[in-house]
Image (cartoon, rainbow, N blue to C red):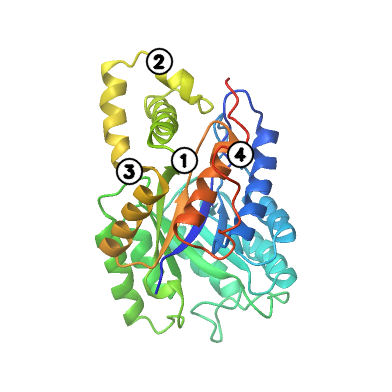
Amino acid sequence: MSLRLSVLDQSPVGEGFTHSDALRASVELAERADALGFTRYWVAEHHHSPGFAGTAPEILAGTLLSRTTRMRIGTGGVLLPRYEPVKVAEVFSVLASLHPGRVDLGLGRAGGPAQRFPQQVREVSRLLGIGEGREAGQLPPLVSAPDVPPRLWLLGAGTRSAVLAGELGASFAFAHFLAPEPGVAALEGYRQGLAASAAAPGGGPAEKGVLAVRAVVADTRERADGLALSLLLWRTRKDLGEDRPLPSPEEARRHRWSGAEADRAAVNSQALVCGTPEQVREELERLAAAHGVDEIMVNTLTQDPADRVRSYELLAQAFALSGGSGLRAAGAHREPAVA
């Protein structure tokens, strides 16, 4: 089977753009990705961040479902410790009722006390009528539970959520872009748990898991390197306590890197794939084979939304996705703005 590609959108805010610009850019990118042939499109949840605009992924997901026709749309993810499980279940029950067969509910353990996370996940699953514990005496499904429930996903950069996803028969996405090292072990643990689970769903990516990889593609290697440098400067600043919007490639080239920044960027570069379409395709196929998955969820952050759209267009072309053949000619896209 050929490798499926999906999108993880964190609604990045670049210097010279507003949070409102970033949210509108997410809607436009989703519409383009739907036409290009990507499999699914997830939006993330972040709070109090100058660099990310998506504070309410369930609202953004609802908008994207109404603006697309083919892709699965979901959250990558709802930070479950911040919420009551019944509210999350009710929101996604409505989305799944309005858009049957197209909704992914991705849950993350960040955002609050994590010790209740397994219990909260089980409660959401039971309320939606898709998980274990539907027998007498357990939480009954919602009265409004949809005929076609959302697909439940757990997200993580380690083994805990992977093991839990396997036990529950949920799908699992590993955040390679946050911590590449545990990926193989986490996905293998997930698949082992899934094989032993009585709740395991049949077919689809749930059997293998999905790998979320940060990547940036451009028409030339030089342009790709410039976009990657911008991303690395943003991530390095964030790691060192300076949370800012994404800088332009021009600013990143002018920046005088401290020793601590250079060291941190070297570490972060290990979780970043960049280059021409052919170079990035080769590396993504290698990562998919190494992790035993047949779907890669690509996360691309750029200061200018035009560069992000172009990156996904080039990926669609490189992987011959359905819809990826009608791309604009190289150089025909809007030139990136300089902050």
Looking at the picture, how far across and down is residue 82, in whole percent? 56, 49
Tell me the residue that label 2 is attached to: 255
Tell me the residue that label 1 is attached to: 219
Q: Earlier in the sequence, mark 2 or mark 1?
A: 1
Q: Residues within 10 Å of mark 1 (few under 14, many from 20)?
A: some
Q: In the rendered view, tell whether residue 335 sits above or below residue 103.
A: above
Tell me the residue that label 4 is attached to: 332
What is the spatial separation of the Cα atoms under label 2 and label 1, in whole angstroms?
24 Å
Q: Earlier in the sequence, mark 1 or mark 4?
A: 1
Query: What amino acid is at disc 3?
Result: Ala
Query: What amino acid is at disc 2?
Result: His
What is the spatial separation of the Cα atoms under label 2 and label 4, in whole angstroms?
29 Å
Looking at the picture, how far across and down is residue 270, in whole percent? 28, 41
Q: Earlier in the sequence, mark 2 or mark 3?
A: 2
Give the tally of numbered discs.
Answer: 4
Instruction: Say what secondary structure mark 3 lies in.
Output: helix
Q: Nearer the viewer, mark 3 or mark 4?
A: 4
State which quadrant residue 272 falls in.
top left
Q: Residues within 10 Å of mark 2 (few under 14, many from 20)?
A: few
What is the spatial separation of the Cα atoms under label 1 and label 4, in whole angstroms?
11 Å
State which quadrant residue 10 falls in.
top right
Q: Nearer the viewer, residue 289 or 88?
A: 289
What is the spatial separation of the Cα atoms under label 1 and label 3, in whole angstroms?
21 Å
Q: Nearer the viewer, mark 2 or mark 4?
A: 4
Q: Is residue 84 in view from this perspective? A: no
Q: Earlier in the sequence, mark 2 or mark 4?
A: 2
Tell me the residue that label 3 is attached to: 271
Q: In the rendered view, tell whether residue 178 sits above or below residue 237.
A: below
Looking at the picture, how far across and down is residue 231, in whole percent? 43, 32
Instruction: Say what secondary structure mark 4 lies in.
Output: loop
